[in-house]
Amino acid sequence: MTKTLNIIGGGMAGSEAAWQAANQGISVVIHEMRPKVGTFAHQTGNLGEMVCSNSFRSDDNEQNAVGLLHWEMRQANGLIMNIAEKHRIPAGGALAVDREPFAESVTAALKAHPNISVSYDEITELPDDGHWIVATGPLTSDALSASIAKATGAEALAFFDAIAPIIYFDTIDMSQAWMQSRYDKGETEEERTAYLNCPMDKAQYEAFIDALMAADKTQFKDGETAKYFDGCLPVEVMAERGRETLRFGPMKPVGLTNPHAPDDKPYAVVQLRRDNALGTLYNIVGFQTKMTYGAQKEVLRMIPGLENAEFARLGGIHRNTFLNSPTLLTHDMKLKTHPNLRFAGQITGVEGYVESAAMGLLAGRMAAAEINGDDLPAVPQVTAMGALVSHITGGADAKTFQPMNVNFGLFPPVDGLKGGRKGRKDRYKAYTDRAKAEWLGWLGQEKLAAE
Ligand SMILES: Cc1cc2nc3c(=O)[nH]c(=O)nc-3n(C[C@H](O)[C@H](O)[C@H](O)COP(=O)(O)OP(=O)(O)OC[C@H]3O[C@@H](n4cnc5c(N)ncnc54)[C@H](O)[C@@H]3O)c2cc1C
């Protein structure tokens, strides 16, 4: 059997996957289309180029899920984290880097590795045989996107994300909100109470519409034209179409009775839907938005019950090619219908440099173990790596699947700890302690399996 692993895309995920597999003795070819074929966001031909901000976000591995992901990657000799450390610039608690030297060093490290070669070509068709990782990111070239759509079904590949904000359930004030599906629809009690409802009276609704329309919005970049459909219009665009549009759309109050005030008919209702199997995260239905992050927090906390809401992720609409991974990928990131192909990085429906590199790290190790004939143990779900990969390959609701950052809402709860904001510090410390122990255990077992 060939020991070569081909990786399409030398961005965050592809670079990390190549490094990990090459370190396990696998011969790796990275196929990168830049600089021959460009994208609207990349500026250079470097591998591991950061397309926008120069930050890998929080480096706090005790209280922050992305900081924990940094830590887990460092323990696994992650290329992106090692090189980021070398080019670190002061940024408070964040890990920010000098971007050009960073990408130049990633490129140099990969090219210097005896097991890695780089082929500067665009791959236009999904290959039928051999071992491949597809890590072509949010700006996958048109030809390859068409080939992926053919293999997965067009409806399973999205070209824009339309992200509604996601909130930690335990920060919602349930003395104002209540659980009920519209018209109590559903066969089981769970279905009849599937939605979380936040009521508004007329004055609250009018003030909310004013704030939505006045809020700061982000603009699309050149080349990132917004071809969003009527089904996923930003909430503020719906509001601009008429003050009553939302009350007859996602905020309609019909079929709902507020148990806290059964005689008061709400004027409008904001509905939230469970976003993960654990029930720790809820998304605001129909609230995809181009409001700036600061404006979102301010405006959405005007919703009764969400005054103290903490956001696992804020909303957005971007050019973003991604798969409906919960239906398409196996737990070890292979395309169910084409097991010679693994996917990694942002195209799998994670969001961000760190998350993409992390999924590259896992895909590289999984592919290497397979080629070497090793039995790789499952990644524990209580680690940041495991929480993320479990979410995209099964934990997320496939019907509403949108890209996700790593956050503590993806972690199975630790028993016996206080919920809400007050218990947060202890809870996060417990999550990170547990994750670290399990990640070291997994790396140890993985090493044993390879011996
Ligand atoms: C405009 C924009 C701004 C962003 N800003 C941020 C930010 O500030 N912070 C953040 O964390 N994340 C940001 N992201 C998300 C960011 O792109 C990802 O987090 C990260 O780069 C994804 O890593 P990746 O390896 O999956 O994809 P990429 O890093 O994009 O790498 C994919 C690589 O595949 C190559 N490629 C594509 N198609 C082919 C093909 N057919 N053949 C060969 N090569 C191919 C591309 O040239 C590219 O090098 C942004 C995304 C966009 C589009």
Image: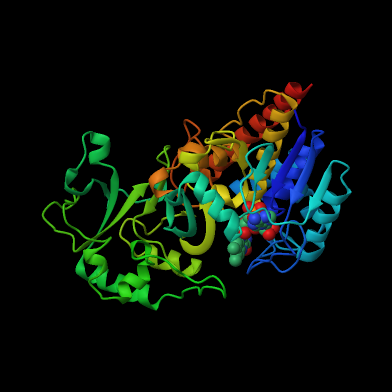
Image quadrant where residue 72 sits: top right
| Quadrant (top left/top right/bottom left/bottom right) for the N terminus | top right
Q: Is residue 338 left or right of residue 228?
A: right
- Whether residue 37 is visible, yes or no, is yes
Judge whether residue 59 can be spotted in this image.
Answer: no
**Residue 425 x, y percent position in the rendering:** 55, 45
Drawn side of residue 120 relative to residue 177, left or right: right
**In the visual, does 270 lie left or right of 321?**
left
Residue 398: image x %, image y %? 42, 43
Residue found at x 77% / y 45% = 29
* Horizontal and vertical percent position of residue 251: 26, 61
Q: Is residue 281 above or below residue 211?
A: above
Q: Which image quadrant for residue 297?
A: bottom left
For this orientation, the residue located farthest to the bottom is: 214
Query: Measuring 41% from the left and 50% from the top, which residue is drawn there?
Result: 171
In the image, 370 versus 259, the foreground residue is 370
Vertical arrangement, residue 192 with respect to residue 253, above or below = above
As drawn, is 231 to the left or to the right of 428? left
Vertical position of residue 220 compared to residue 164: above or below: below
Q: Among all residues in the image, which is located at the extreme left?
A: 263
Q: Position of residue 374 (x, y in %)?
A: 71, 24
Say which of 398 and 139 sits in front: 139
Res 389 quadrant in image: top right
